[in-house]
């Protein structure tokens, strides 16, 4: 298993170091990881003058999977836009054709108090949101701001999806639903937007090949409401880029703890870019206090989705659960009665629990 390891900026190097510890521990148990590091984001700009240096993109392309920390930092905020760290992230996702973004929202029973919703609404929550990542209104042409003959300015973005783009994400969603509770909810706005009317038609066609999957549909406004009203009705949600952007952030907050949430972005062959859902947290960088669990759980997703190794995925997730059950917490998830530990100590604890 050849893994490109891209620590990035801020807390990136600290949290990636813990994930690397976990992979090394698994290696000593017989799994073979070949890991190579490269710079991305601000680190890429500092070392090679580019947030996605050519050598980094080549390493990512030549690897089976990419593990990324996070990018961004205040010192880069005044650079011209193409040189900013976030551009490195957008380019690597596009360059790898990582069109399927998987973001689980899972509430660990030990962290039930972290949610702003009532415990009975979120207890046992386990949702997978699948967001199409390389199409939709974020990429559609024409776009821009122009001046009308009247002298008034007009902003234009174009929502568009081709049948093949919808088909491939619908297929990923059905496959993932098959590995879970076989319940899939497709979210659209088919009552108003033709693009998403086509979305619904194609999802229905694709789902015919998965008769065991119970397919339902919700309009995005209703889905946003249902996510806070009764989130446990969902198992897998599939939706387009813009709706998924919003709904996945909403769903992540049901769990209350950004430091716990991994993500995967997959191409058509399940090659993936794995990263925590949070950013580079410059406010706490370099202090060894960040929560590395989202990054460690991203390794579990890598084992599940790219390497098809459910046993190892569950082993990592089981180790994280064990550590939480033992009362160890980083600062972001600390509450009275638990024990606060450092980022590196959390990595050690997961390795011990493995
Ligand atoms: P952020 O996610 O970095 O931080 C938000 C808050 O959550 C901060 O208070 C931070 O300390 C805390 N936090 C985040 N991750 C944590 C962890 N693992 N453990 C403990 N606390 C954690 O979001 P932001 O502050 O809006 O952005 C900071 C930088 O990160 C910006 O430059 C932004 O562009 C970038 N960013 C990068 C990504 C990415 O790399 N995927 C995503 C979002 C933001």
Image (spheres, rainbow, N blue to C red):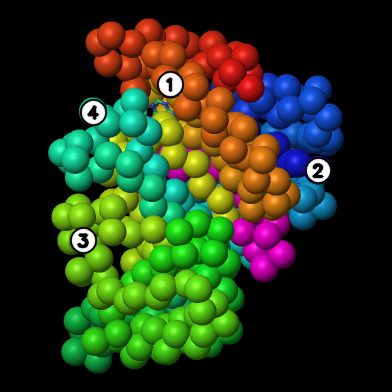
Which comes sooner in the sequence, label 3 or label 1? 3
**Which of the two marks, 3 or 2, is nearer to us in this view?**
3
Real-space Cα separation, disc 3 to disc 1, in angstroms: 29 Å
Residue at figure coordinates x 24%, y 91% from the top left: 149
Which comes sooner in the sequence, label 4 or label 3? 4
Residue 283 is drawn in which quadrant? top left
The relative height of residue 166 versus residue 198 in the rendered view (above or below) is above
Real-space Cα separation, disc 2 to disc 1, in angstroms: 29 Å
Real-space Cα separation, disc 3 to disc 2, in angstroms: 40 Å
Which comes sooner in the sequence, label 2 or label 1? 2
Secondary element at image label 1 = helix
**Horizontal side, residue 163 vs residue 266: left or right:** left
Residue at figure coordinates x 30%, y 85% from the top left: 190
Locate residue 253, reporting x and y percent: 29, 43
Label 2 belongs to which residue?
Answer: 1
Locate residue 86, reporting x and y percent: 50, 48
Label 3 belongs to which residue?
Answer: 226
**What stretch of residues is rendered in magenta?**
266-278
């Amino acid at each position: 298993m050849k893994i490109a390891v891209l620590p990035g900026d801020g807390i990136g190097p600290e949290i990636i170091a813990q994930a690397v510890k976990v992979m090394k521990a698994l290696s000593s148990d017989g799994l073979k990881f070949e890991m190579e590091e490269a710079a991305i984001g601000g680190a890429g700009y500092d070392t090679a003058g580019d947030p996605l240096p050519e050598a980094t993109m080549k390493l990512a392309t030549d690897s089976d999977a990419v593990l990324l920390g996070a990018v961004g930092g205040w010192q880069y905020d005044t650079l011209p836009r193409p040189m900013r760290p976030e551009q490195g992230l957008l380019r690597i996702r596009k360059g790898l054709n990582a069109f399927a973004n998987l973001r689980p929202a899972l509430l660990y029973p030990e962290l039930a108090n972290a949610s702003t919703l009532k415990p009975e609404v979120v207890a046992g929550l386990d949702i997978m949101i699948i967001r199409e990542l390389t199409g939709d209104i974020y990429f559609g042409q024409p776009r821009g701001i122009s001046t009308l003959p009247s002298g008034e300015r007009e902003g234009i973005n174009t929502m568009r999806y081709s049948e093949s783009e919808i088909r491939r994400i619908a297929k990923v969603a059905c496959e993932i639903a098959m590995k879970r509770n076989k319940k899939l909810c497709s979210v659209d706005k088919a009552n108003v937007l033709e693009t998403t009317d086509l979305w619904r038609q194609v999802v229905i066609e694709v789902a015919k090949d998965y008769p065991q999957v119970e397919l339902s549909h919700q309009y995005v406004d209703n889905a946003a409401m249902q996510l806070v009203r009764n989130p446990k009705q969902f198992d897998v949600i599939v939706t387009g880029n813009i709706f998924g952007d919003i709904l996945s952030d909403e769903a992540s907050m049901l769990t209350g703890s950004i430091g716990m949430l991994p993500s995967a972005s997959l191409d058509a062959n399940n090659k993936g870019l794995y990263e925590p859902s949070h950013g580079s947290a410059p406010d706490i960088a370099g202090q060894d206090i960040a929560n590395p669990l989202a990054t460690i759980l991203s390794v579990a997703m890598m084992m599940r989705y790219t390497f098809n190794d459910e046993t190892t995925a569950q082993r990592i997730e089981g180790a994280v659960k064990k550590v939480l059950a033992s009362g160890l917490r980083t600062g972001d998830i600390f509450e009275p009665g638990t024990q606060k530990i450092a980022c590196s100590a959390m990595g050690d604890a997961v390795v011990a629990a493995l």
